[in-house]
Image (tube, grey):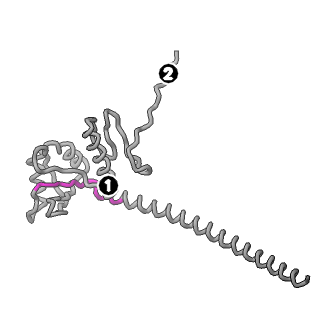
Amino acid sequence: MNEVKNMFKTLMEEIAEMKRDQRAYQTEVTTLREENQRLTERLERVEQHLEKLEKAERRNNIVIKGGKLQGSEITAEVEELLKNKVGIQTKIQEARLVSEKYDIVVAKIENWDTKRAIMKQKNKLKGSETFNEDDYTKQESEIQKKIRGIAAAEKGKGVEAKVGYKKMIWAGEVWHWDTKLDKLVKPPSHPKENPKN
C-alpha cells in the first residue's frame, strides 16, 4: 500500500512540475508574441518612414518614356524636349537613362511648381511616341498599376473611368485607394442635413 502511495505521490509531483513547466512555456510564448508584435509594428513604422523619404526624394522627378534621349547630354536633351514639345522652359538638375531597351529617362526638375506645370501640359505629347509621368515609388507604382487595370476593365465594359493618383473617377464618383484593404473604396456618403424649419 505504501508503494502505491509513493508512486501516486511521485506521479503527482511530476504532474505538478509539468504544469509549472507548461506555465513557464506559456509565459515565454506570450512574451515572444508580444515582442514579435512590437517588432512588427516597429518594422511597419520604419517601412513607412523609408517610403516617405523615397517619395520626398522623387517628388520633383518625372519619367520620360519614348523620347529617344540616349545621347551623352541627356540633361540638355530633356530640357530641349520639354521646351519644344511641352512648351515649358526649365532647368533640369539631373537626368539619367534608366532603361536603354525601353528608352526611359528619369529627370529631376528644378522645383515642384515647374514639375506640376509640366505634368499639366503632358497632354501636348498625345499622339507622339513620347510621354511623361510622375516618378512613383515601388509601392505607389504597384497601386497605380492595379488602379489602371481596374480602369481598363471598366472601360472595356463601357463605363467611364479615369485614373488619378491613388484614386479613380468611376462613373462620375471618386474612389480612393485604401492601403490597408489594398483596394479602391467608395468614400462614405454623408447624408444631407435637413434644414431647420
Residue at point 34%, 46% (across, down): 166
Disc number for residue 177: none
- Mark 1: few/some/many CA within 10 Å (<14, 14-19, 20+): few
Q: Residue at x 28, y 47 (%)?
A: 148
Say which residue label 1 marks: 142
Residue in the image at 10% along x and 59% along y: 69
Residue in the image at 21% along x and 57% along y: 108
Residue 129: % across, % down: 11, 50
Task: Name the amino acid type tagged 1.
Answer: Glu
Which is more toward the observer, 23 or 86?
23
Q: Amino acid at mark 2?
A: Asn
Q: Position of residue 128 (x, y in %)?
A: 10, 47
Specify the segment rendered in magenta.
Answer: 53-67
Q: Which residue is the extreme one toward the right? A: 1
Dot 2 crowding, Cα within 10 Å, few <14, some 14–19, many 20+: few
Pick the front one: 171 or 79: 171
**Horizontal relation, residue 88 to residue 175: left or right:** left
Q: Position of residue 161 (x, y in %)?
A: 28, 38
Residue 194 numbered tag: 2
From this viewpoint, which residue is outermost toward the top? 197
